[in-house]
Amino acid sequence: MPCANSDQATAKVTRWPWLPKERILFTGDLCVNWGFGNNVADADADYDNWLRALDTMASMNPAIVVVGDGDLGGAQVLSAQKAYLGDMLGQVRKGVKAGKTADPLATEINLTSHNIGADKGRNAASVRAMYGKVARGLVAC
């Protein structure tokens, strides 16, 4: 099965299976289609490259996207994942630059407008995890 390569979205997940004739893409946990968010706390997550990987996947114009968790979808699930992750990252970066700490940000940042981010508790945990990486300089601010 052919695989497409990412730009190191995570150190562990750098390729995803792609069936070009059928236009079926298997994303693993780089994309989910459910209301519980995604595992941004993964120690190997590189958010900027994760966003680029989602763009690369979307450019393949898949007809079917087999996500890591949740229902099958089309290319729109890639856009939804990118919007959710990008929104969270943008708000966390803004908070870090403003000198805020993780707990207030976890309460303030509301991602429930994204179907992926319907679970407030998991969003708060994700924001805290992302904050830790951004604040420690593991991710560009």
Image (cartoon, rainbow, N blue to C red):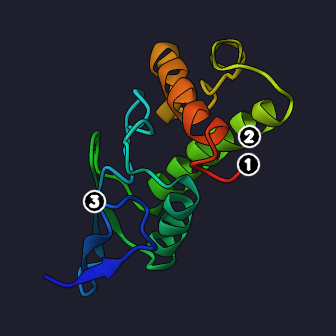
Q: Report how many numbered discs are placed on residues in the image.
A: 3
Residue receiving disc 1: 141
Residue receiving disc 3: 12
- Going from N to C along the chain, the mark reached first, 3 or 1, is 3
Residue 131 or residue 68, whichever sits in front:
131
Residue 61 or residue 30, whichever sits in front:
30
- Going from N to C along the chain, the mark reached first, 1 or 2, is 2
Q: Residue furthest left?
A: 1
Name the residue located 48 percent from the left edge and 57 percent from the top edge: 78
- Going from N to C along the chain, the mark reached first, 3 or 2, is 3
Disc 1 and disc 2 in contact, CB within 8 angstroms: yes
Q: Return the x and y of residue 44 as percentages of the image width and height.
A: 38, 51
Query: Alpha-carbon neighbours of circle 2 within 10 Å: few (<14), some, or many (≥20)?
Result: some
Residue 38 or residue 63, whichever sits in front:
38
Residue 93, labelled with which disc? 2
Disc 3 and disc 2 in contact, CB within 8 angstroms: no
Left or right position of 137 against 12: right
Left or right position of 36 against 68: right
Q: Amino acid at mark 3?
A: Lys
Q: Return the x and y of residue 13 as percentages of the image width and height.
A: 29, 62
Q: Return the x and y of residue 2 as percentages of the image width and height.
A: 20, 85
Q: Secondary structure at mark 2?
A: helix
Name the residue located 78 percent from the left edge and 30 percent from the top edge: 95
Q: Residue furthest right?
A: 98
Disc 3 and disc 1 in contact, CB within 8 angstroms: no
